[in-house]
Amino acid sequence: MAKYLIGIDIGTSSTKAILISSNGSIIDQEKASYQIKTPHYGWVEANANDWFEAAISLIRILATKVDAKDIVAIGIDGLYAGSGIPVDQSGKIIGPTLIWMDRRATHEAAEAETIVGNKELEKVSANIADPYYGFTKIMWIKKHHPDLYQKTAKFLPPESYIIRHLTGNLSMNYSAAGNLAGIFDIDHDKWSNSIAFKLGIDLKKLPQKFIQSTDPAGYLRDEWAKELGLKAGIPIFNTGVDVGPATVGTGVFKPGKITVAAGTSMSAAMVTDHPLRNHNLIIWPYAYKPTQYYYNFAGANTAGAIVTWFAKEFGIELTDKASINELNQHSLNVPIGSNGLIVLPYFMGERSPLWDSTVRGTILGISLKTTKYEIYNAFQEALAYAIRDGIDQFGAKPDGVITLVGGVSHSKKMVQMVADVTGKTVLTTKTGGEANLGSAILAGIGIHEVNAEDVSKWIKIDQKVSPNMKNHQLYNRYFEMYKKAYQSVKQYYKDFSSVIDKK
């Protein structure tokens, strides 16, 4: 009898759901989109009700695609929700969620650096103080909205919030705890009471039960089983922060491989058996075997997001394939370096490896002869440069191959560009690299319906693209100018941020 698994990925701009068989066949995929809010300069908020409604509606749809009694497990992951969802004692949402992209907690990050110091923060959590991290956002809420902080019983990641509703159980994946940073002791897999005390953060406002992605977080309650059309009592797995399951979805179950996920944002990651401290990376426990393996990555806040912005502002409909093909076709004729354009893709500041909250997106070299196709190409090159910058943080490279997943991997032009800029062979997959698939796989492993060793057989290599070394040599020169451009403007943006703050 066939058995089926559901994977749910709560993303920044949409929730994606997948239904697979326990042998890896994809039965169906569904998606629900929503909007984030940017109420002020550097602020990015989300409404957690959107996440809940999207997840519930998609599970309900997938439950109709096969005999519901044969759906045996659900895995749920989520975007890094920064501060987490503030809920009261009854579990009701009482405020917006300050997601990973939000950069408002600059003063709180500086305060944490003064009170504790990056040396101690990195020693304990493997991470430094930065507005990206949830612990600084919680400090911001406490300082600027003390009533909200006081009323908040728990700050919950999106996957924890949804699973609590469906099962009645509260847990937090190790990866989500580790990505809060500062107050998580990564070597001992627990909250750091000493650092939390110094920073004035009440640890009782966070989940106390840490859970692995392959251990059931709870079991579907009767009332929700009826609502969703599923069997009561099926196990639900908390699979943590999305990029971890996404990497599992490429078949990574042991250290050494480099995986680049490029969608709205970008992460260039390597799994290791020890945290890569002092590399300017973001580090937390991996989605698979979190007490043994670590996920180390550099991340661009705005990757595909800048192409979406470009298309929107230039009146190009991204859902229109003809428009996308026109952009790609015409920009193929643009030479390396986009006729003198360099784009810095830091539209919402930047996290690892720059750790710069004040820098913003910049187009250098524009003239009256510049065309939209040159700008488009320069945006694509900027993403490729960001990928190379991230990979360079790993130091000694394990090999000359990277696996590229996410929306960018569907563009032949971008895949070749990434190969040429990095000088590495790029693999893309027909399946794999989607967090919802990884979550379904982890749930399958948890109920012993999936063997981790078999997953790599599911991942079908779609492309193997080698770099054009002549292009790579030329891109080396432009990459150096890309890095020099940032060094030239970073002080300007730091100074200018004080002007913006006064408005």
Image: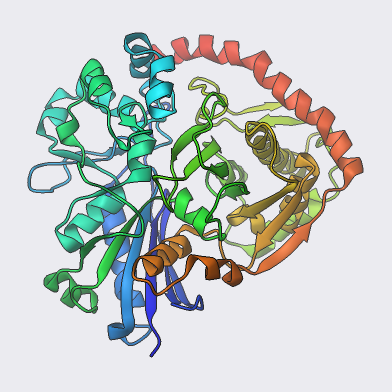
> From this viewpoint, which residue is outermost toward the bottom?
1
Tell me where residue 71 appears, x and y as whole percent. Answer: 32, 79
> From this viewpoint, which residue is outermost toward the left?
90
Q: Quick check: 378 above or below 434?
A: above
Q: Nearer the viewer, residue 59 or 438?
A: 438
Q: Quadrant of residue 233?
A: bottom left
Q: Quick check: 499 above or below 227?
A: above
Q: Nearer the viewer, residue 53 or 174?
A: 174
Tell me where residue 74 appears, x and y as whole percent. Answer: 33, 67
Q: Answer whether residue 184 is visible to the viewer in this image.
A: yes
Give the number of marks.
0
Q: Does residue 398 appear left or right of residue 407 in this picture?
A: right
Q: Quadrant of residue 429?
A: bottom right
Q: Does residue 83 appear left or right of residue 151 in this picture?
A: right
Q: Quick check: 348 above or below 11?
A: above
Tell me where residue 248 appears, x and y as whole percent. Answer: 50, 57
Residue at image position (78%, 56%) is 465
Colouring used for the render: rainbow
The quadrant of the rendering that contains the C terminus is top left
Q: Answer whether residue 323 is visible to the viewer in this image.
A: no
The quadrant of the rendering that contains the N terminus is bottom left
Residue at image position (23%, 50%) is 171
Residue at image position (23%, 79%) is 229
Tell me where residue 487 appears, x and y as whole percent. Answer: 66, 16
Q: Nearer the viewer, residue 498 or 141?
A: 141
Q: Quick check: 239 above or below 193?
A: below
